Amino acid sequence: MANIFRSNDIPMSEILVAINKGLNQLPDFQRGWVWDDDRIRALIASISNSYPVGALMFLEYGGDSIRFKYKPFSGSSSKNKPEILVLDGQQRLTSIFGAMYFRGPMLTKTNKNKQINRYYYLDIEKCLNSTIDRVDAVISVPEDKKIRSNFGRNIDLDLSTKENEFKNHMFPLNIVYDMIACTQWQNEYQKFHNYAPQILDRYMNFNAKILAQIQAYKVPVITLSKETPKEAVCQVFENVNTGGVSLTVFELITATFAADNFELRKDWEMRKEKFIQKSALSISNKADALLSDVSSTDFLTSITLLSRYYLRQNGGEAISCKKKDVLKLKLNDYKKYADQLTEGFLQSASFLKEQRIFSSRDLPYSTQLIPMSVIFAVLGPMAQDGTIKEKISRWYWCGVFGEMYGGANETRYASDVSGVLGWIHDGKEPDTVQRAYFEPTRLLSLQTRQSAAYKGIMALILKNHCCDFISGRQMDFIVFLDERTDIHHIFPRDYCIKRKIDKKKWNSIVNKTPLFARTNRIIGGNAPSVYMKRIKDNGHVAESQLESNVRSHLIDIDDLKVDDFDKYFLKRAKSLINLISNAMGKKVINLNGEDVVSAFGGALD
């Protein structure tokens, strides 16, 4: 395979001229402006000191494999077709072009994100003073070139005329790469000061030590050939880009679709807002909406799966959604399937709520939404049939408790889409269902809600119609929100620490359950026998109802009454294993192994 790139140092002056002529432009990724005034001054200081500012990455424009919409740099009015697209270095080059080449004011912002227009100067005296940091010699002035204080009443520096530039020894940076303009400014500056020897000597040093360094400055550039495949562009960018805004699959597809005048970003933002609106706990609580973590790349991955699934049904190539497949997505396919897939995501959210998963915080795997959305999109109304939904449920819980979706696994996405849909149509069980395995001792290592299995067990407890200890209310969608439901210890933390109970046990999922915030406050750090008696004696709930409420959490009430942690712990572990087994539709094995008996104090069968 021919070399797809070359790397060499290019003079900054050459790059800026090409930007001005429109020969170097930007792919239309529609990224926002991100560099503020202070960062621009620091960048100018680095260049004036001949410090490196990082490599740039260019792409030759005009190949058959990549067709992006392009746009000129801010400040360039050229209508030319580009020869080069800048993939990495937009912010740096925009800053340098605006501050050191473009003759008009540069649009930037303060460190508080307020938009401002600025011109940049070098203070000649400060540049030559070795005790002054170079960045302090880079002067930023407003559009009228007057720096004011005292709420605008006092003018501290006025550079609005050339004479004032000369008087204050301020060199305008936007002429630094124009040799004729530099020479003219030098002559007029020296004439203004009557060719005083100290002025001539100072400017000679300034020219040699500062201006010449800037004018000769070179930057390393990696240039990808026009034949580079899209997936290679993305991969190379990830390898060389160590900071700034990363180049994602979504950015590349956005620029590709923009060439056909389709605004992918606007279309995605509309769908994202719909996801949040439809899956939020409430109008005032959108941040934790069930679908809030679905990313633009997730959506493109899903739509690639969906289009490839239908293609496969018609004898096409195998279902796949690797990066190279997503980058081949056609605009026509996107338009054809986007609405159908959107409905698939919304159906997925409804399904998850039925499983008692209400928010993104409690979602075991956001990645499992990718194949799930495609499955629901293909099935449509059929997914509501009881037998079909039961299979989807089994597949889902096998993915959760088998912990199959711990990373971006494009192969599993594709396998599960074809596998689940084939299973629904009387095929064999999909790979995820066949391979899923839950190790009983895993219950002890589930200590925080970081784990998918931890979140899954809590959802199953909710789905088992558990009721709050005191109110007796079932924890459905509305109650879950209104009562600020959270996960709490059954044998309280303080009690367990005082009794020196093994933390691996008392802090595990086995000793936790969802409770209302008010109930948890009443429980406090007391022994179960104490807090149950207090709840009953204070008239919060009748004893029989309290016991029924506690049992709904798969807790043996008799063990709680006598504070027998070991018996309670073993029985609840068995109950949780049964929940998991029923959800997965398969038996959990090794329930009486030596490791299990040692860990729980008895077998779990």
Image (tube, rainbow, N blue to C red):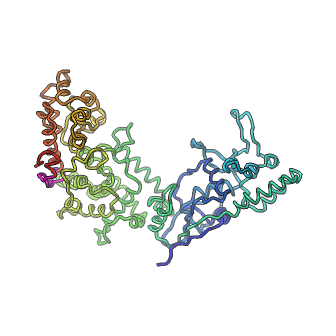
Residue 9 place in picture, x, y as percent: 61, 68
Stretch in magenta:
581-594
The magenta stretch spans residue 591: yes
The structure residue drawn at horizontal position 33% and vertical position 62%, both measured from the top left corner, is 410
Residue sitting nearer the eye, 503 or 43: 503
Q: Is residue 161 left or right of residue 130?
A: right
Q: Is residue 559 above or below residue 324?
A: above
- Answer whether residue 119 is visible to the viewer in this image: no
View extreme (bottom): residue: 1
Residue at x 69%, y 48% (from the top left corner): 132
433 or 268, nearer to the observer: 433
Q: Where does residue 577 sit, x and y in percent of width and height?
A: 16, 48
Q: x and y percent of residue 513 in the render? A: 23, 38
**Exactly how many numbered labels are in the figure?**
0
- Above or below residue 155? Residue 58 is below
Residue positioned 27% across, 57% down in the render: 404
Residue 377 in percent (x, y) is at 30, 56
Residue closer to the observer: 9 or 298 = 9
Q: Residue at x 40, y 60 (%)?
A: 335
Horizontal placement of 232 versus 319: left or right? right
Q: Is residue 544 left or right of residue 40?
A: left
**Residue 413 against residue 563 in the figure, above or below:** below
350 in magenta: no
Q: Main secondary structure of the magenta part?
A: loop
Q: Quadrant of residue 585?
A: bottom left
Q: Name, please, the residue furthest toward the right.
A: 194
Visible residue check, residue 411 = yes
Asked which quadrant contains residue 548, the reply is top left
